[in-house]
Amino acid sequence: MTVKDDVARLVGDALEEAQRTGALPAAAVEGVPIERPQNPEHGDYACSLPLKLAKPMRMSPMAIGEKLVALMPLRGPFDAVQVAPPGFINVRLSEAWLTQQVDLIRQEGPAYGAVHVGDGRRVQVEFVSVNPTGPLHVAHARGAVIGSALASVLEAAGYDVQREYYFNDAGNQIDQFNRSLYARYLQHFGREAELPPDGYMGDYMVDLARELAAEHGERFLEMPAEAGTAELGRLGLARMLAAIKADVQLLRVHFDLWFSERSLIDEGQLDRAMGLLRERDYVEEREGAVWFKSTSLGEEQDKVLVRSSGVPTYFATDVAYHYNKFIERGFDEVIDVWGADHQGHVSQMKQVVGALGIPSERLTLIVHQMVTLKRGDQVVRLSKRSGDLITLRELVEEVGTDACRYFFLARSPESHMEFDIELAKEQSADNPVYYVQYAHARIVSIIRLADERGIDFAEGDVSLLTHPAELALIRKMLLLPELVEMMARSLEPHHLPHYAAELATAFHTFYQQCRVVSSDPEDAAITRARLKLVDAARTVLARSLSLMSMDAPDQM
RNA sequence: GCGCCCGUAGCUCAGCGGAUAGAGCAUCGGUCUUCGGAACCGAGGGUCGCAGGUUCAAAUCCUGUCGGGCGCGCCA
């Protein structure tokens, strides 16, 4: 239970008591709202319940507040509660309690920040899932960072998390890919060949053809064209997939499972999903095709599941995939991270899940907006088909993994973000990334110094920590578990970089004002206490960075 | 035309219906004999696109409107 929950209970218990004894009239309440006031004069936590109860209770907010505060015992972490106009209950934490948390944080170590909102429930996070017909680009990097950070946060919040990449290895686009590759392959050997009209034009296809030619020679020329195209395509696809794996690894993104679209067809899951939809009367045959009757669910149009040619659409396999996620594998919750270009499919996907008999709230679609990439003044448009502009790899190699992760993560998914490469490089010294990491390196070097001087602070007395900067740092450290809980509930990991920067500031401010390792013998006790604080700060900062899959360097 | 997203400081962006709307960068001004100055402290800078509405309380919710992005296929 977080402190915030404890505050809510403190107020909630008082309300119950007041209503039971008749001190306050009966009124329906939906939860106890607890906030963190921005003005420190308002204490550590604030509750606006009296303001909300004023109307149903027909009393002034201040009077309600007074009644409640009178019933709130100053136990445990709490030092003072008071009512403030226009009707807030402000709660302040006790300094003695705050300092004790330093020891507790050190005890928890790298596990600090973990909460139990997930309660072991199984959640699948599917992200990136770009077709392996070309290299990953900048927008994909954004999805990769959002998805992986969200997965880490959910894990810290007590969920059993599965990270998954769904890749297309069947269908039209793969045919296009195969034909494009075959054409490049023929061209490599000086044969006359034209790319298909909707083919993949990028130079990477030329490179891929050359690599395969180097490895396999003219083998595919000797086959009938159709077989050659298919054979070559299969090898090319495997290479593209391997390249994508390498690319996401550059961003420190790991997947538990790479899920093949084709396997849904081969292993009968598509048929079973279609059968279930048909059974539930959501399928209709018309004009030689098989349709999902989404208009019956309020959608604007029906969707084709199986073309008149007998070939299932991507939509059909997507239905099968979600059937597989919920019904065959039994995930409690599923989160899909999509780019804005897929926004139009969100309501259809939700309807499909409902049509399969699954409460559609169990599926969450996180749609992130596009990334506008800039090099100075030049706007670079992102298109996989028309050519190879800035790839994920180029970006990461130029800007660095940590900076990429930090910047992509710091923007909320729905914001249309701008990424100026020149700026990111020029400002690297003033980068918030390095600011946060520098705080960690600084901490480690202080502890290193203490080690060199043979200072043992295991018995440090944390009650000596009374300086405002010390207490401010502790308060900031205590925010992490609440933040993890909030992020897991809202599925918004973008708060993490902002928190890390605030924590770093709290540390730097403390460092500026409080000498840690002092050579004056009279300071021995406070030195030991502060070393404990510094060590706890290292724990929390390192945890914040690890949740973002960022490096926590010992030196820079 | 319809759907989704965005519009907050010079720039890039936070902001859970609550108290005086914040951060970084940029600008200006301070701090330094000792633990890492990649630091700290301070200042200026805002009609939260605009107009209505709901509410004790709106940057936040609703409606409309203007501007920008992305979609609207028997493509994925």
Image (tube, rainbow, N blue to C red):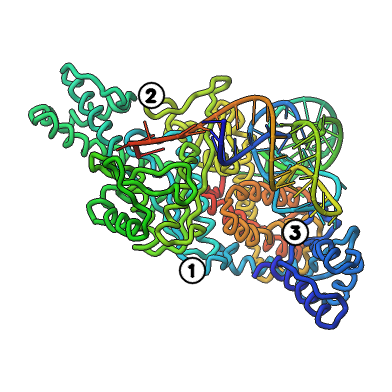
Amino acid type shown at disc 1: Gly
Of circles 1 and 2, the one toward us is 2
Who comes first in sequence, dot 1 or dot 3?
3
| Tag 1 secondary structure | loop
Residue A288 appears in which quarter of the rendering?
A: top left
Query: Percent position (x, y) of residue A68?
Result: 85, 72
Name the quarter where the N terminus of chain A is drawn.
bottom right
Amino acid type shown at disc 2: Ser
Observer-nearest residue: A492 or A217?
Answer: A492
| Tag 2 secondary structure | loop
The tag on residue A100 is none
- Give me the chain letter of mark 1: A
Task: Tell me which residue sits at (18%, 36%) in the image.
Answer: A230
Observer-nearest residue: A353 or B11?
Answer: A353
Q: Do labels 1 and 3 touch, CB within 8 Å?
A: no
- Residue corresponding to mark 3: A35
Task: Tell me which residue sits at (33%, 60%) in the image.
Answer: A279
- Residue corresponding to mark 1: A120
> Visible in this render: residue A99?
no
- Relative horizontal placement of residue A517, taking residue A273 as reference (left or right): right
Q: CA distance from mark 1 to mark 2?
A: 45 Å
- Give me the chain letter of mark 3: A
Query: Percent position (x, y) of residue A15?
Result: 80, 74
- Residue corresponding to mark 2: A386
Circle 1 packing at 10 Å, graded few (<14), some (14-19), many (20+), is some
In this view, A514 is above or below A338: below
- Relative horizontal placement of residue A348, taking residue A81 as reference (left or right): left
Who comes first in sequence, dot 1 or dot 2?
1
